[in-house]
Image: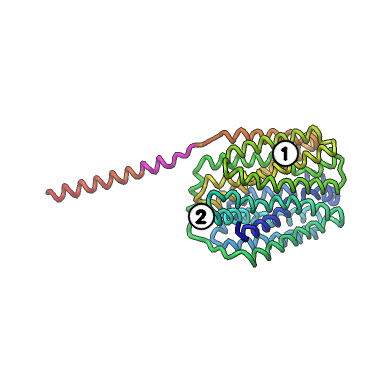
Amino acid sequence: MKKSIYVLALGAFGIITTEFGVIGIMPTIAREFNVSIDTAGWLLSGFALTIALTGPFSVMLTSRINRKLMMCLVLGIFVLSNVLSAVAPNFTVLMIARILPAFLHPVFWAVATVAASKQVGPKDAPKAVSVVLGGLSVATVLGVPITTYVAELINWQASFILSGVINLIAFVALAALVPTMPVNEDAAPKGQLKALRRGQLWVNLMATMIMIAGMFATYGYLAEYLGKISRMSGKEISLMLLLFGTTGIAGNWLTGIALSKNVILTTRLFLLSLVLAHLLAYTFGGLFVPMAIIISIWGFVHTGGFLIGQTRSTAEAPEAPELAASLMVSFGNAGVTLGSLLGGIVIAWYGIHEVIWLSIVLLMAAFGLSFVYVKQPAPAAKTGAVITEEAEEETEMASALEYSKD
């Protein structure tokens, strides 16, 4: 893999540390600002909802800007967001500071994943994208646990400062090491919109949203789950999140290889494996050692979901990869919002332990959608148009011959 692909992965690490870093410190923030845990959950779901609503529009509006310059701008705004979050005097200001970078979050993902896939052959594209998405895995390995640990060691403000420093390092690396990426004419918004006619693209996007909702209905409240059900301390929760992310790196790499061989089979095995991990967590969640083993299995499977959604979405729109990638980011974050929101409701009504059943139902719904296939009728219409044009040419030639005879 080229060096620039790993730099893009570093940028992914920075923005995911910012987005998901609040998972580990959510209970602390809830206590600090005297809000309920489901209200604090909006620090994650509000961020994701903003992405879901604005993703494709922000990508289309910035489609003519040099891609390297755009990614640097995104990382710079993430640095600013973390600084503002660290000095927030109340929960409202913290929410505003969190939402600020969400508008441009999908731009980075769309550009970075497409840029990575274009630097290798089509067969190796899933592997290249998996390297960039590996930044997500490493963020769960180092970013989320470290921000949680720093909050325990110093305070919650220090965790946001740490996220800001990570994004600043990614900004410098990208500016110094990645070559300029001028925009070609094929990136014009009008040409990309044709991809939206494909029914299978929308089926895959809907399946991605439901799948990620199932992933985050429980994972979004994992720190709370480990504290209440597994009765772990703050430091033990940090270690569990570290274990979750560590196995996720290997899982993400293996998912990239599997997708290169068979996309749909990999998708189905992923969903069934994640359902099994949730069932084990529900059954043995109160036991420390079994739960530690389950966390390692859960993390190994979990991270591959983002790569699966990315691969299935962009495969349906090869002529508009950035738009498809941005739609995947929007639907994926809509899934984060939906999962976090429904998870918060289940927790409020039935308790943290029962939220796992919500994840299982959503994951099985996504599994069912993996059997849905929408046929693309466009080629037939195009053929008809060609026949019509040929018929018109024959008519014109016949008229010309008739005229010459006269």
Give the percent coordinates (x, y) of residue 378: 44, 42
Residue at 82 percent across and 48 percent down: it is: 239
Q: Nearer the viewer, residue 137 or 219?
A: 137
Q: Amino acid at mark 2?
A: Pro
Q: Nearer the viewer, residue 279 or 216?
A: 279
Q: Is residue 308 left or right of residue 138?
A: left
Chief secondary structure of the magenta span? helix
Residue at 66 percent across and 37 percent down: it is: 271
Q: Is residue 385 left or right of residue 98?
A: left
Residue 362 in sight in this render: no
Q: Amino acid at mark 1?
A: Leu
The label shown at residue 103 is none
Callout 2 crowding tier (Cα within 10 Å): few <14, some 14–19, many ≥20: some
Residue at 75 percent across and 58 percent down: it is: 163
Give the percent coordinates (x, y) of residue 300: 71, 43
Give the percent coordinates (x, y) of residue 82: 75, 59
Magenta region: 375-384
Callout 1 crowding tier (Cα within 10 Å): few <14, some 14–19, many ≥20: many
Which comes sooner in the sequence, label 2 or label 1?
Answer: 2
- Circles 2 and 1: CB distance less than 8 Å? no
The kind of secondary structure element at disc 2 is helix
The kind of secondary structure element at disc 1 is helix
The label shown at residue 342 is 1
Q: Is residue 380 left or right of residue 232?
A: left
- The residue pinned by badge 2 equals 189
